[in-house]
Image (spheres, grey):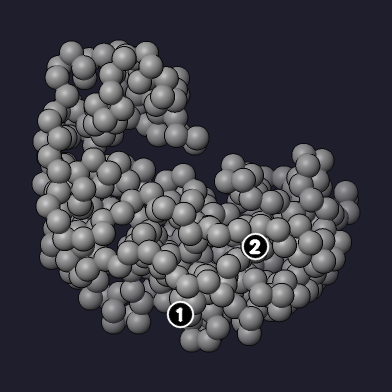
């Protein structure tokens, strides 16, 4: 995969500005962004439609739309920082990440973007890692990195730091919970600088200046699990972010590896449980390399989830009729359901159902769940 030509579309400056405005607007997450582009053909047209869609979905308040000035300021800050934004359909977007459900439409990246063409292994684990745990994580990162894989981790203390340092020469990717200019923990700012100035890359979906909060770290974990073909967990407590990463990796169809540890060490309770649940046992780097070898030969550059290939005019589909909207809302409830089931239940066309769901989403009345399931928001059910 690493030797193949990079394929994809390239956003124009005008499109990139519109994409940034759209993803920074209220109630527009990655799945909503994708549906808006698919329905209206361009981010510019989608931006024009946001107020009407929100109103039709039942919102009584004006939706906040990121302004041109706000997006231009973030783009300027990005450039001053030596970074740039890469769209999901562009060649330098991580190939495996584009395939996950609700992949980020835009990533801020700084460093060696050629690493996004390599198959990647995620390595995560305890922040309060033992000496032996950190050494084993470093051994995995070094040997797997030398075999042609990028190593991706979360820049945290302990296992993450050991994995990054061991793969500085072969290629390491730091997935960040805050903006690229907000490393966490702050003590790893120098490590981040080594990564982005050498054979490494930093990626984030968060705005510049965004200080990471507790709820942002699962999003960071999603980047790690989605970018990698497999995830190795080295020391993890029974309730830890590393196990969230492992769960996400399983949901994305990635391989999950776990390093066994002493039953008496709380830092190993999570990894030992992963092994009980079916994770691949790892006692040496070769265990990982043999399992990943077939996957690394797969062409992951499939059609992206959101694509805007030219500057053509967007589309303005007719709004759903009131009875169609009511039928979709009546079919929904607090229990998550598949969109295909809504289509079958209502007998409405796919485009109509998706458009009603967009209206509800932008009005804050829809909740999206793993596996593409949807439900009415708690106060709307």
Between 60 and 187, the one nearer to me in the picture: 60
Q: Residue at x 76, y 70 (%)?
A: 140
Identify the image quadrant of residue 12.
bottom left
Q: Is residue 216 visible?
A: no
Q: What crowding class fits label 1: few (fewer than 14 Cα within 10 Å), some (14-19), or many (20 or more)?
A: many
Label disc, if present, on residue 131 of the rendered structure: none
Q: Residue at x 26, y 56 (%)?
A: 308
Q: Residue at x 36, y 59 (%)?
A: 89
- Horizontal side, residue 291 vs residue 61: left or right: right
- Horizontal side, residue 58 vs residue 296: left or right: left
Q: Is residue 324 visible?
A: yes
- Horizontal side, residue 25 vs residue 86: left or right: left
- Horizontal and vertical percent position of residue 81: 33, 80
Q: Which residue is mark 1?
A: 111
**Sequence-wise, which precedes: disc 1 or disc 2?**
1
Identify the image quadrant of residue 154.
bottom right
- Horizontal and vertical percent position of residue 201: 50, 75
* Viewer-side label of 1, 2: 2
Callout 2 secondary element = helix
Asked if 83 appears above or below 101 in the picture, the reply is below
- Horizontal and vertical percent position of residue 7: 42, 66
Between 235 and 71, the one nearer to me in the picture: 71
Asked if 380 appears above or below 283 in the picture, the reply is above
Q: Residue at x 30, y 41 (%)?
A: 35
Callout 1 secondary element = strand
Label disc, if present, on residue 296 of the rendered structure: 2
Q: What crowding class fits label 2: few (fewer than 14 Cα within 10 Å), some (14-19), or many (20 or more)?
A: some
Give the quadrant of the N terminus.
Answer: bottom right
């Amino acid at each position: 995969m690493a030797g193949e030509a990079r394929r994809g579309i390239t956003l124009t400056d005008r499109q990139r500005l519109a994409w940034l405005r759209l993803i920074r607007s209220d109630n527009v997450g990655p799945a909503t962004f994708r549906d808006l582009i698919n329905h209206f053909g361009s981010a510019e047209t989608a931006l024009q439609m946001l107020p009407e869609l929100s109103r039709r979905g039942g919102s009584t308040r004006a939706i906040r739309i990121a302004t041109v000035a706000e997006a231009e300021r973030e783009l300027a800050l990005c450039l001053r920082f030596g970074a740039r934004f890469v769209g999901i359909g562009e060649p330098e977007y991580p190939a495996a990440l584009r395939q996950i459900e609700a992949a980020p439409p835009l990533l801020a990246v700084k460093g060696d973007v050629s690493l996004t063409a390599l198959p990647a292994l995620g390595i995560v684990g305890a922040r309060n890692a033992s000496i032996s745990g950190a050494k084993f994580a470093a051994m995995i990162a070094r040997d797997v990195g030398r075999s042609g894989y990028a190593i991706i981790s979360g820049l945290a203390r302990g296992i993450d730091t050991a994995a990054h340092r061991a793969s500085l020469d072969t290629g390491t990717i730091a997935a960040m919970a805050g903006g690229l200019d907000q490393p966490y923990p702050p003590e790893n700012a120098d490590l981040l600088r080594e990564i982005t100035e050498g054979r490494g890359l930093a990626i984030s979906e968060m705005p510049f200046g965004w200080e990471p909060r507790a709820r942002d770290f699962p999003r960071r974990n999603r980047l790690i699990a989605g970018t990698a073909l497999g995830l190795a967990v080295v020391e993890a407590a029974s309730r830890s972010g590393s196990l969230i990463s492992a769960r996400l990796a399983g949901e994305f169809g990635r391989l999950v590896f776990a390093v066994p540890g002493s039953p008496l060490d709380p830092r190993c309770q999570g990894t030992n449980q992963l092994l009980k649940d079916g994770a691949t046992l790892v006692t040496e780097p070769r265990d990982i390399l043999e399992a990943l070898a077939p996957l690394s030969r797969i062409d992951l550059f499939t059609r992206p989830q959101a694509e805007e290939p030219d500057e053509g005019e967007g589309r303005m589909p007719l709004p759903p009729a009131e009875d169609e909207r009511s039928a979709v809302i009546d079919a929904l409830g607090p229990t998550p359901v598949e969109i295909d089931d809504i289509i079958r239940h209502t007998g409405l066309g796919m485009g109509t159902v998706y458009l009603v769901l967009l209206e509800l989403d932008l009005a804050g009345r829809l909740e999206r769940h793993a596996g593409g399931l949807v439900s009415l928001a708690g106060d709307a059910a």
